[in-house]
Amino acid sequence: MLRIGHGYDVHRLTEGRALIIGGVNIPFELGLDGHSDADVLVHAVMDALLGAAALGDIGGLFPDTDPAYKGADSMKLLERVVAVLKEKGYKVGNIDATLIAQKPKIKPYLFEMRENIAKVCMVDVDAVNVKATTEEKLGFTGNMEGMSAHAVCIIGKA
């Protein structure tokens, strides 16, 4: 049995924070604001995986009211999501994710992001696709107010 999930996340850009996307620390003058490390791409991936298994979303598993997750590494949170899927008898099939950001240029980091996500999800790197796009200077992402990400995935019985 295959199940499909979709995830979406958004974070505001702010000064004084590291920009971590797909587990990669990207040199940039702004970072993403959030309770954890605010890795918008990984958050969308986690929501897609949880959604596919009908297990809610990351806010239910890792509430932003819990101080245990303050500054948390989203890749570690993704490890926990994959463990929960395994406990429920699921494994990751594939993931396709899109980052929406006006700046910085993401292309040099895409393969490393894919590798990071694939390793934690225990799949081959060819089962993870990450792409990036701008919004042609339109909307909150185009105006450099924030970044967003979408992800879709397929999971199956282990």
Image (tube, helix red, strand yellow):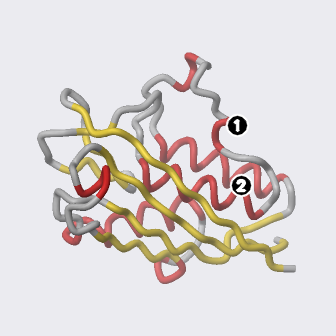
Q: Residue furthest top?
A: 67
Q: Answer above or below: position of 150 versus 95.
A: above
Residue at 48% of width from left, 47% of height from top?
75
Residue at 75% of width from left, 64% of height from top?
52
**C-alpha separation, residue under disc 1 versus residue under disc 2:** 9 Å
**Quadrant where the N terminus is found in the figure:** bottom right
SS at mark 2 in the image = helix
Foreground pick, 133 / 96 = 133
Q: Answer above or below: position of 10 versus 44.
A: above
Foreground pick, 85 / 133 = 133
Residue at 67% of width from left, 76% of height from top?
93
Q: Answer above or below: position of 34 versus 20.
A: above
Q: Crowding near pointer 2: few (<14 within 10 Å), some, many (20+)?
A: many
SS at mark 1 in the image = helix
From the viewer's perspective, is 33 left or right of 105? right
How many numbered badges does the structure rendering display?
2
From the viewer's perspective, is 153 left or right of 8? right
Q: Position of residue 66 (x, y in %)?
A: 61, 19
* Residue 50, label in figure: 2
From the viewer's perspective, is 134 left or right of 149? left
From the viewer's perspective, is 90 left or right of 77? right
* Residue 61, label in figure: 1
The part of the image, by quadrant, that contains residue 60 is top right
Q: Answer above or below: position of 43 versus 14.
A: below
Q: Position of residue 62 (x, y in %)?
A: 64, 33
**Quadrant where the C terminus is found in the figure:** bottom right
Amino acid marked by disc 2: Leu
Q: Position of residue 100 (x, y in %)?
A: 35, 62
